[in-house]
Image (cartoon, helix red, strand yellow):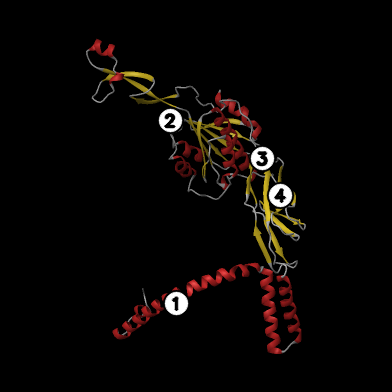
């Protein structure tokens, strides 16, 4: 620990030693005091905290103004401030009676359906039941729905009585909309005091992006049982390549006995490595790569449409974005993941660094698809292309709202310009042909 004696040069040694001793004594004393006072302070806060949290910001302002007015009246003897302070304190005292009372609600929040497409209708239902044995006075129930707040005025309820409230959920934008938690609110009409109790856990509504149906195998993926033959040579596979001399350690099952007998030397088979089709989709979600929010939503819809068809075909695949890897076990899980994707700030220095970081732990792909906005440059596409080998098929989707659909090429990379989601099926047929 650095003390004042250490910071001031030239102090005599006895003075410096005394200062250090005093500093150490003060530190020990503060620790002892906190060891005693700390538990007491925490216990007091546990008792007083719930009471203080009942006071709203408006209530604290009223209490401060009342204290200030009464202080001025005592100092200067002004009757006006006495009247003002007394009136404000009376308002706070009267509002206390509005927060008393027990509540025994059973609240069930339902969303029907739990998953919709952008623009579809979604309804919610909140069923409130008096599960107690006493009558309950009227109260207000609040239910956050996304960024909004639904408020319901409940009537007085007798035991076992049920009240049903319906509400609409806005689905004009792809998102995960959280409905809840439901809270009953007691308080005065002015808003000085507020006491809320939580009764139901939040529920999620998934608003999926709009997608289009693609023809089976529209992505041009290899679907035969043997997989796709690559140029890599291996000692154990299906596609025969050539014969080579036997070396110690080779598997004897692959010795070609006829040729070995004919030339008088052991020869073994070599194979071309085959691999199952593995698709990797790379969706760039940096906001500066897109000209508008509509363009970004189109890119998400294109990604989800292709991924849904690939999963339905039973082909192994992965979808990555700046935020991480999507869940692709089922079409529903993939669409749920797409709801959480948002255009955000730059996370990685470059697009290439993003693609490298997000795909380095994934299986080696046989097909790579890169999806980016209209502000993504050819150099960005080429930088991602260089991460994968020459035996990997690669396709880039250049998303530009309103652009004419077309095929292009950048340094051997097929680039497809998509201006509308409805153009995707015909463009994908062109990829597979």
- Distance of label 2 from label 1 (alpha carbons): 71 Å
Mark 3 surroundings: few (<14), some (14-19) or many (≥20) residues within 10 A: some
> In this rendering, which labeled residue sits more in front, label 4 or label 3?
4
- Which of the labelled discs sits on residue 289, or is there none? none
Rendering quarter of residue 192: bottom right
Task: Please determine whether, in this image, residue 317 is positioned above or below residue 174.
Answer: above
Give the secondary structure at mark 1: helix
* Residue 35 as seen in the image, left or right of residue 220: left
User: Of marks 4 and 3, which one's residue comes earlier in the chain?
Assistant: 3
* Residue 381 as seen in the image, left or right of residue 24: right
- Which of the labelled discs sits on residue 116, or is there none? 3
* Residue 360 as seen in the image, left or right of residue 376: left
For the residues labelled 1 and 4, say whether their Cβ atoms are less than 8 Å apart: no
Q: Which residue is mark 4?
A: 127
- Which of the labelled discs sits on residue 390, or is there none? 2
Pick the residue in front: 76 or 53. 53
């Amino acid at each position: 620990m650095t003390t004042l004696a250490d910071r001031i040069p030239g102090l005599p040694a006895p003075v410096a030693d005394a200062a250090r001793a005093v500093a150490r004594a003060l530190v020990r004393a503060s620790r002892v005091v906190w060891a005693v006072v700390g538990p007491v302070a925490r216990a007091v806060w546990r008792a007083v905290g719930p009471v203080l949290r009942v006071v709203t910001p408006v209530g604290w302002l009223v209490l401060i103004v009342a204290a200030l007015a009464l202080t001025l009246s005592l100092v200067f003897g002004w009757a006006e401030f006495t009247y003002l302070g007394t009136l404000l304190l009376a308002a706070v005292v009267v509002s206390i009676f509005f927060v008393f009372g027990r509540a025994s609600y059973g609240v069930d929040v339902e969303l029907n359906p739990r998953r919709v497409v952008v623009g579809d209708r979604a309804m919610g239902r909140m069923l409130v039941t008096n599960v107690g044995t006493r009558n309950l006075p009227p109260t207000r129930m609040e239910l956050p729905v996304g960024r909004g707040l639904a408020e319901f005025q409940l009537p007085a309820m007798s035991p076992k009585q049920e009240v049903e409230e319906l509400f609409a959920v806005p689905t004009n934008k792809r998102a995960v909309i959280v409905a809840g938690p439901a809270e009953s609110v007691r308080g005065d009409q002015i808003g000085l005091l507020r006491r809320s109790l939580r009764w139901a856990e939040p529920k999620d509504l998934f608003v999926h992006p709009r997608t289009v149906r693609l023809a089976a195998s529209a992505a041009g993926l290899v679907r035969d049982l043997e997989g796709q033959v690559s140029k890599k040579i291996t000692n154990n596979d299906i596609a025969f390549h050539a014969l080579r001399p036997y070396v110690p350690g080779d598997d004897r099952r692959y010795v070609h006995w006829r040729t070995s007998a004919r030339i008088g030397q052991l020869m073994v088979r070599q194979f071309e490595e085959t691999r199952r089709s593995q698709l990797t989709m790379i969706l760039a979600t940096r906001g500066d790569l897109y000209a508008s929010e509509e363009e970004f939503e189109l890119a998400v819809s294109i990604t989800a449409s292709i991924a849904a068809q690939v999963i339905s075909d039973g082909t192994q695949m992965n979808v990555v974005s700046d935020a991480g890897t999507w869940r692709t076990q089922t079409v529903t899980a993939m669409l749920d993941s797409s709801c959480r994707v948002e255009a955000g700030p730059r996370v990685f220095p470059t697009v290439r660094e993003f693609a490298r970081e997000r795909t380095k732990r994934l299986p080696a792909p046989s097909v790579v698809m890169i999806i980016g906005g209209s502000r993504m440059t050819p150099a960005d596409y080429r930088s991602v292309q260089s991460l994968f080998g020459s035996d990997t098929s690669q396709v880039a989707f250049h998303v530009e709202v309103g652009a004419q659909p077309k095929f292009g090429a950048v340094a051997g990379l097929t680039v497809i310009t998509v201006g509308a989601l409805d153009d995707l099926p015909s463009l994908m047929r062109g990829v597979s042909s």
